[in-house]
Image: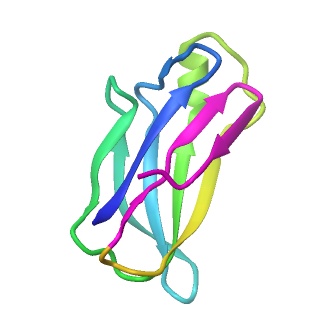
Amino acid sequence: MGISTHILDTSRGKPAQGVAVALLKHDGEGLRLMKEGVTDADGRVKGLVEGEPPTGMYALRFAVHAYFASLGQETFYPEVEVRFMVRSGTEHYHVPLLLNPFGYSTYRGS
């Protein structure tokens, strides 16, 4: 149960350390911030949501511009936002981000 994420920088073949990540939940009027964190050496943010997350629409917002700037690289996407649905609080929702300076991909992990 819960919500987790991690980022792999596919251009370097390494986890993306030091990326600010925000978890937001749609409250009927817009997105509201639930939790913020920064990726660790393994590219993970632990403890975004532990236990049963309420059902509804969520977003993970990744501030990738500062990450690439710290590597001396330009990036086309200064920010990546991934929206997803939590349909059952009894499941775990792992939302990885595969990232490079000019593209990204995501999927529902386990």
Residue 39 position in % (x across, y down)? 37, 35
Which quadrant holds residue 83? bottom right
Q: Nearer the viewer, residue 49 or 36?
A: 49
**In the image, residue 104 lies in the stretch drawn in magenta:** yes
Q: Nearer the viewer, residue 90 or 86?
A: 90
Looking at the image, the residue that sits furthest to the left is 51
Residue 41 position in % (x across, y down)? 33, 23
Residue 51 versus residue 45 in the image, above or below: below
Residue 43 versus residue 88 in the image, above or below: above
Which residue is found at the position 50% from the left and 45% from the top? 96
**In the image, residue 69 lies in the stretch drawn in magenta:** no
Looking at the image, the residue that sits furthest to the front is 110
Which quadrant holds residue 52? bottom left
Q: Is residue 110 left or right of residue 26?
A: left
* Number of numbered discs on residues: 0
Residue 48 versus residue 72 in the image, above or below: below
Span highlighted in magenta in the image: 91-110
Q: Quadrant of the N terminus?
A: bottom left
Q: Is residue 74 left or right of residue 89?
A: right
Which residue is found at the position 67% from the left and 42% from the top? 105
Which residue is found at the position 60% from the left and 19% from the top? 69
